[in-house]
Image (spheres, rainbow, N blue to C red):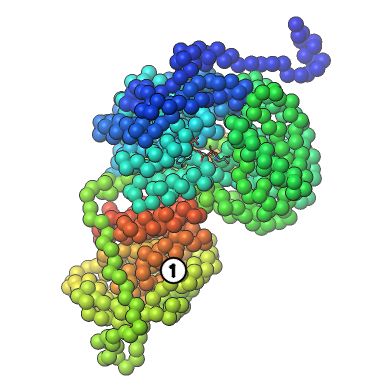
């Protein structure tokens, strides 16, 4: 027997195994076989197909699990649809009780879930016990709260409907909680597909739903592979898709949902920077790396997988990191003394091995911890590549394994440039003792989450999600609740946008009445970079009134004009840095100058829509009120401070996207276009506006007002032509950060599909809005869509 004296002599860890017996008993009780959970019952798969699930640490078979087919998805969606009216009609308080009961029951079974997660996924018991399961519980408590407060905190909103939710294998139960808890709180019902490698905790959760008496059909779980997921995504009975996983599959889902009314949130990959400045506490930063990249074997979307270290401390930091790596314990994940567990599956292990081999083959300097792990099971040694060129695949691609790379920088600007040199934008970790440095850098990073002197911190009260190709939408907190709610009026019946009249480009332009009468011919040019610009195509078209009369000629825009407009908008970045007050001043001045030209615009509105002078005057008054509204809002779209961990403030900052394309609709064209452009401008975005071609002469007069209103060049650019074609160019453009499309169904489908390339956020409205209505035409929904939230975690205290 080992004595205390022996232990003191060697100071070695002894084995400290967590018992697997309760989980094995549960598996035995199910004869190691699981069916789908549909309408409150476990049902056999329609095609009687199953797949095997293994423990990645031992390669033992744990169970066989039903393989979901189209028929199974159909049955589950029908169950969710059937359960929806009663569930969404419950009071918030009644739903809160269910969510509270789920949280309580999860706590009662906490160790069982932790052990099962570890056996199914390979993550260490320390993590599943101390991080995953407590956070799962926290999410259900937090969202019991949102259910309780729904009416007062989200007035005039309602549930989206039936939600299809697809989760990955890296945090199986936690991702379920991130998706199921807000969905249920808001009154939705769900069909969830767990990952093929790790379905077991979701099935145990299904049993827990029965245990708490959740009404049948509110939560349905269909197990299966990518095909099962694809079937759920394309099912016509699903109103929303929430997905966490790879960027590649995110793109497929974006394409598959294009042209449907499905609400979509995507939480995708990352290649997050871990930035160490020379004044950082280097030992703390080394521990941060451990939490960043060896947490869950690096199979974490927000893993700090790219170390950027200031040159003057790079060598010292590298030495410290290697010394720490020597102490990492790799092995049986059920052993409480182990730091690093098993990789989820042989496939993933193979992928990691290949990427590491490619780095070595390219001559990169590679350092690995000695791998003293069991011979069976999928283990991989913690790995550190130093001085990796910024463009190398290891610095750009998500490895999703315990592999970190590093590179050095000299100045703060260089650190920011390197950090942002990625197609992703999920998270970042900053290490410095200087708060000025931390906040200056945090503000400049393209990342949805920034941890200051910390890493991989999560809380249910904070939204989590990415910029750029890391996806869109947020999970957690108030931000996340919006993903599962819609304004009530949007669910009410309403007319769809009509197709635009085709724009006729002709070799011969008929003379206009106005043109004949005038001595100097005038044709409407575009407004790009604060200048009037002729169309690149060299073509013009006739602009006709509502009654068909030829009013004048306008240039016909093409992709080159859009590219020029985007380029100039990109350069106008100062607008995004300006204070809200400065932007408000410009918008007020714009209102003032617009008011001075009232008669011009009233005449245009009359000519375009064939409306009376009184009606046109009323519309113009609404335009002025809208400009005032957003001038007023420019310094009031505040972020918030979330209540998260003790000794932390978590700042939720509303940031502009950058360059946003807007395709505005034909009805009430001036009011509609400004109702779309103004919230974007007020929040610091630069805009490329594509107004309806019929209204181009009016917009040519509008930019003369802009010219006199101190609007900096490039902040608002206006190009017209075939609106849907131009909108598609904007959707495809890599330098356009977001797109608002308000138009007919066919064009909406086009831009959504085109946006899959760089996964830009799109806000699409195929419905005809009543722009004069305050409910539909202005307000919080517009401001929310105009910004993306960056959450910055800042610790305090000594
Ligand atoms: P996927 O993106 O393929 O899987 C995520 C989920 O989507 C799983 O439930 C999966 O099912 C399902 N799925 C797969 N294909 C489709 C589809 N066409 N339509 C709908 N759902 C689908 O990730 P993988 O598990 O294949 O991992 C591959 C790589 O992705 C990893 O190496 C890693 O780099 C990255 N990844 C990133 C994650 C993140 O959070 N950022 C999470 C997981 C992986 P099934 O499991 O059965 O394939």
Residue toward you, 216 or 311: 216
Q: Residue at x 62, y 47 (%)?
A: 397
User: Looking at the image, which is closer to me, 352 or 61?
Assistant: 61
**Camera sees residue 582:** no
Q: Is residue 691 left or right of residue 333?
A: left
Residue shown at 66% from the left, 58% from the top: 413
- Left or right of 514? Residue 105 is right
Nearest the eye: 607 or 73: 73
What x and y, as percent, mark residue 429? 62, 44
Q: Which structural element holds mark 1?
A: strand
Residue 207 visible somewhere in the drawing: yes
Instruction: Give the x, y percent position of residue 453.
Output: 64, 41
Identify whether 417 is placed above or below 640: below
Image position of 326 (left or right of 479)? right
**Residue reaching furthest to the top:** 1
Residue 336 drawn above or below residue 798: above
Label 1: few (<14), some or many (≥20) within 10 Å? many
Callout 1: CB less than 8 Å from ligand 1 = no
* x and y percentages locating residue 249 in the rendered image: 49, 44
Q: Residue at x 63, y 34 (%)?
A: 349
**Considering only vertical position in the picture, is 341 above or below 725?**
above
Residue at the far right: name it: 9
Query: Where residue 203 sits in the image (x, y, percent)?
Result: 44, 24
Side of 21 relative to 433 (left or right): left
Q: In the rendered image, which quarter contains the C terminus?
A: top right
Which residue: 64% across, 16% down? 17
Q: What residue did someone put label 1 on? A: 716
Q: Farthest bottom residue? A: 519
Task: Specify the quadrant that holds the N terminus.
Answer: top right
């Amino acid at each position: 027997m080992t004595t205390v004296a022996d232990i003191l002599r060697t100071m070695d860890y002894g084995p400290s195994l967590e018992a697997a017996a309760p989980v094995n008993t549960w598996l035995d009780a199910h004869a190691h076989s699981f069916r789908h959970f549909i309408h409150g019952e476990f049902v056999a798969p329609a095609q009687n197909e199953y797949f095997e699930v293994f423990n990645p640490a031992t390669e033992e078979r744990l169970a066989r699990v039903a393989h979901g087919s189209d028929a199974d998805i159909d049955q589950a969606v029908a169950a969710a649809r059937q359960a929806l009216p009663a569930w969404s009609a419950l009071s918030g308080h009644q739903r809160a009780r269910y969510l509270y009961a789920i949280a309580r029951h999860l706590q009662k079974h906490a160790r069982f879930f932790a052990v099962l997660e570890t056996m199914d996924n390979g993550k260490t018991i320390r993590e599943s016990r101390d991080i995953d399961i407590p956070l799962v519980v926290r999410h259900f408590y937090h969202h019991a709260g949102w259910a309780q407060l729904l009416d007062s905190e989200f007035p005039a909103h309602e549930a989206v409907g039936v939600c299809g939710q697809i989760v990955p294998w890296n945090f199986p139960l936690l991702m379920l909680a991130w998706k199921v808890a807000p969905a249920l709180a808001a009154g939705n019902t769900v069909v969830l597909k767990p990952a093929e490698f790790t379905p077991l905790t979701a099935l145990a959760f299904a049993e827990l739903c029965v245990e708490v008496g959740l009404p049948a059909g509110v939560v349905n779980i269909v197990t299966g592979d990518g095909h099962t997921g694809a079937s759920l995504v394309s099912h016509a009975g699903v109103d929303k898709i929430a997905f966490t996983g790879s960027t590649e599959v995110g793109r497929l889902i974006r394409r598959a949902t294009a042209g449907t009314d499905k609400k979509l949130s995507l939480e995708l990959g990352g290649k997050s920077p871990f930035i160490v400045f020379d004044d950082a506490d280097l030992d703390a930063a080394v521990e941060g790396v451990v939490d960043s990249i060896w947490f869950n074997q690096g199979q974490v979307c927000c893993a700090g997988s790219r170390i950027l270290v200031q040159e003057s401390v790079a060598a010292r930091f590298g030495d410290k990191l290697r010394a720490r790596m020597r102490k990492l314990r790799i092995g049986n994940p059920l052993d409480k003394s182990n730091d690093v567990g098993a990789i989820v599956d042989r496939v993933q292990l193979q992928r990691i091995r290949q990427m590491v081999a490619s780095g070595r083959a390219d001559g990169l300097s590679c350092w690995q911890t000695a791998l003293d792990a069991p011979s069976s099971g999928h283990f991989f040694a913690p790995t550190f590549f130093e001085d990796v060129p910024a463009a190398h695949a290891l610095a750009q691609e998500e490895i999703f394994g315990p592999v970190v790379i590093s590179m050095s920088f000299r100045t703060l600007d260089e650190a920011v440039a390197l950090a942002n040199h990625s197609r992703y934008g999920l998270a970042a970790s900053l290490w410095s003792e200087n708060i000025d440095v931390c906040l200056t850098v945090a503000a400049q990073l393209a990342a949805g989450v920034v941890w200051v002197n910390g890493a991989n911190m999560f809380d249910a009260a904070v939204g989590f999600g990415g910029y750029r190709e890391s996806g869109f939408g947020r999970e957690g907190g108030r931000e996340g609740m919006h993903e599962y709610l819609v304004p009530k009026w949007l669910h009410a019946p309403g007319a769809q946008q009509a197709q635009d009249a085709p724009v006729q480009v002709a070799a011969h332009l008929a003379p206009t009445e106005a043109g004949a009468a005038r001595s100097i011919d005038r044709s409407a040019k575009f407004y790009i970079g604060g200048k009037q610009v002729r169309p690149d195509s060299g073509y013009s078209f006739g602009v006709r009134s509502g009654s068909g009369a030829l009013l004048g000629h306008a240039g016909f825009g093409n992709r080159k004009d859009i590219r020029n407009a985007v380029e100039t908008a990109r350069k106008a970045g100062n607008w995004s840095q300006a204070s809200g007050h400065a932007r408000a001043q410009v918008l007020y001045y714009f209102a003032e100058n617009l008011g001075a030209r009232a008669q011009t615009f009233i005449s245009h509105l009359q000519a375009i829509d064939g409306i009376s002078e009184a009606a046109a005057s009323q519309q113009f008054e609404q335009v002025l009120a809208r400009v005032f509204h957003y001038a007023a809002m420019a310094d009031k779209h505040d972020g918030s401070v979330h209540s998260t961990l003790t000794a932390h403030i978590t700042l939720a900052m509303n940031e502009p996207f950058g360059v946003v394309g807007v395709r505005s609709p034909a009805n009430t064209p001036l009011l509609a276009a400004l109702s779309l452009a103004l919230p974007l401008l007020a929040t610091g975005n630069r805009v490329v506006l594509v107004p309806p071609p019929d209204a181009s002469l009016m917009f040519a007069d509008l930019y003369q007002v802009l010219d006199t209103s101190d609007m900096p060049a490039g902040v608002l650019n206006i190009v017209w032509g075939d609106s849907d074609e131009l909108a598609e160019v904007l959707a495809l453009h890599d330098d356009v950060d977001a797109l608002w499309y308000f138009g007919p169904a066919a064009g909406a489908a086009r831009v959504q599909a085109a946006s899959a390339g760089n996964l830009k956020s799109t806000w699409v409205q195929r419905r005809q809005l009543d722009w004069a209505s305050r409910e539909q035409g202005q307000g919080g929904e517009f401001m929310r869509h105009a910004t993306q939230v960056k959450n910055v975690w800042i610790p305090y205290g000594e």
